[in-house]
Image (cartoon, grey):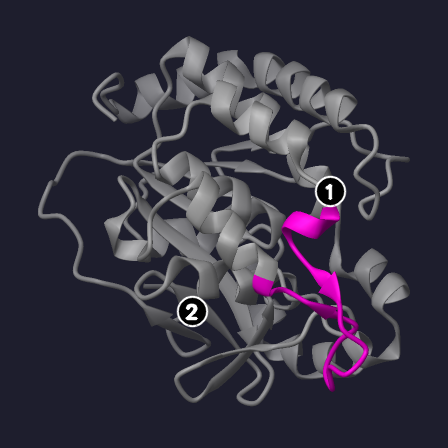
Amino acid sequence: MSASAEVVSFVSEGSSDERPRLGLVLGGGAALGAAHVGVLEVFEQAGISCPVVVGTSAGALIGAGYAAGLSSEVLTATVLSANWADFAQFNMRRRWGLLDTSPLELSVEKHIGVEKLEDLGRRFGALAWDIRASEAVLLTEGPLSSALRASSAVPGLFPPVRIGRRLLVDGALADNVPVWAARALGADLVIAVSLNGDTDSRVQTAGRMLETLRAPRGEHAAVRRDERAPEVLIHPATVGVSRWSPKGVQGLIAAGRQAGEAALPAVAAAVAAADIPQGSG
């Protein structure tokens, strides 16, 4: 696994299947994550199946649903009906953040219905950042709800999530579109979906606390620049849309659908060149 010195990864041994594997990476972006659903709808209709899935923050939430086998129709209905109360509630007594993310656990149980990461139908990883060790953590085993809470725990807004000895926050601090993580889980060809969101815009929103937490990651960023880019990179049109507002979800899904359709020729060519079988999941 590349960048092994920088990444602490709870990765199982995985399958002995030697066939080339298609990986999907869904980037973070809070409410912008609705665009992922549009991309997945296009893939579903085109018969494109990704057995390896990795997500950061909102990408982890959508990716977990996809990895659990939820159809794009179900994902769309879930996103359209969601509101902030499904993910968090105000708790001014919290030391680390304004919001309590315990409602997210109930939402995961209700909509995904899987308790452990390793029980998902596809190989899945949620990226988080350990604020004590200043290193990325790829979560692939253990409670699904805890992993999703950790991957989306924006510092200053949501409290860190304790998993074992680790104190974990939003994976965007490590990498908002972690292509390397999909390769670490066995993907030979990677499709990545970026929501045009980078950690700098998140810094402006979450304040100085996040800038302080990002400071140690320079060494990690240098390693990442040397790694392979995704074979296909999809950019839904999300510029000008607020990542912190639930409004505009329909438009975001449509933007994802449009970007997914535009990327289909490139995806088909890459899959054919890699001789990756489709239709078997």
- Residue at mark 2: 3
Q: Report the magenta residues as a range.
A: 84-102
Q: Is residue 90 magenta?
A: yes
Asked if 193 appears above or below 224 in the picture, the reply is above
Q: Secondary structure at mark 2?
A: loop
Asked whether the viewer can see residue 216, the reply is yes
116 or 221: nearer the viewer: 116
- Residue at mark 1: 31
Question: Taking 244 as reference, is 59 left or right?
Answer: left
Image quadrant in which you'd find residue 49: top left
Q: Secondary structure at mark 1?
A: helix
Q: Neighbour class for label 2 at 10 Å: few (<14), some, many (≥20)?
A: some
Q: Amino acid at mark 1?
A: Ala
Image quadrant in which you'd find residue 280: top left
Q: Amino acid at mark 2?
A: Ala
Q: Neighbour class for label 1 at 10 Å: few (<14), some, many (≥20)?
A: many
Asked if 30 appears above or below 153 in the picture, the reply is above
Q: In percent of the image, x 39 and y 84: which residue is there?
A: 164
Question: Taking 177 as reference, is 83 left or right?
Answer: right
Percent x, y of residue 72: 49, 22
Asked whether the viewer can see residue 234, the reply is no
Q: In percent of the image, x 65 and y 68: which residue is there?
A: 173
Percent x, y of residue 93: 77, 83
